[in-house]
Amino acid sequence: MSDFEAMKRVRCPYCREWVDLYVDPDTVGTLVEDCAVCCRPWAVVVEREGAKMRVHVSRAQ
C-alpha cells in the first residue's frame, strides 16, 4: 500500500454507523459516495497535504 492509499473509518451523517471507506491514491477533491449501510449519498471531501490525508463526510445535497 502506498502512502496515499488508505482505508478511512468514517461515520455516516444519516444513520451514524461507522463505515470503512477506501480512498484511491489519486483522489483529491469532492465526490459522492453511498453509505454501505443505509445507501444514502455522502459528499466526501478528500484533502492531501504531503503524505497526510484528511477525509470529511457530510450529507450530499
Image: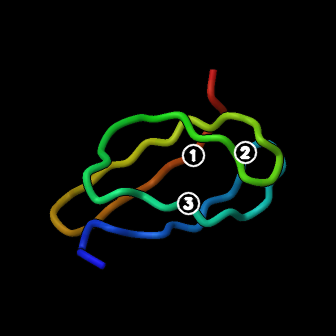
**Residue placed at 27% from the left, 66% from the top?**
4
Badge 2: how crowded within 10 Å, few (<14), some, or many (20+)? some
Q: Are marks 2 and 1 in contact (CB under 8 Å)?
A: yes
Q: Are marks 3 and 1 in contact (CB under 8 Å)?
A: yes
Q: Point out residue 50 in the picture as x, y percentages from the top left corner.
A: 15, 63
Gap in Å between the C-alphas at discs 2 and 3? 14 Å
Answer with left or right where residue 32 lies relative to residue 28.
right
Please name the amino acid that badge 2 sits on: Pro
Q: Which mark is residue 13?
A: 2
Instruction: Name the image quarter holding residue 53.
Output: bottom left
**Height in image: 39 above or below 2?**
above
Q: Point out residue 29 in the picture as x, y percentages from the top left corner.
A: 33, 38
Please name the amino acid that badge 3 sits on: Leu
Gap in Å between the C-alphas at discs 2 and 1? 7 Å
Residue nearer the viewer, 52 or 6: 6
Gap in Å between the C-alphas at discs 3 and 1? 10 Å
Answer with left or right where residue 38 lies relative to residue 50.
right
* Residue under label 1: 57
Pointer 3 or 1: first along the chain: 3
The secondary element bearing badge 1 is classed as strand
Kindly give the residue lying farthest to the top in the view shown.
61
Which tag is nearer the camera, tag 3 or tag 1? Answer: 3
**Residue placed at 57% from the left, 46% from the top?**
57
Answer with left or right where residue 21 lies relative to residue 6.
right
* Residue under label 3: 21
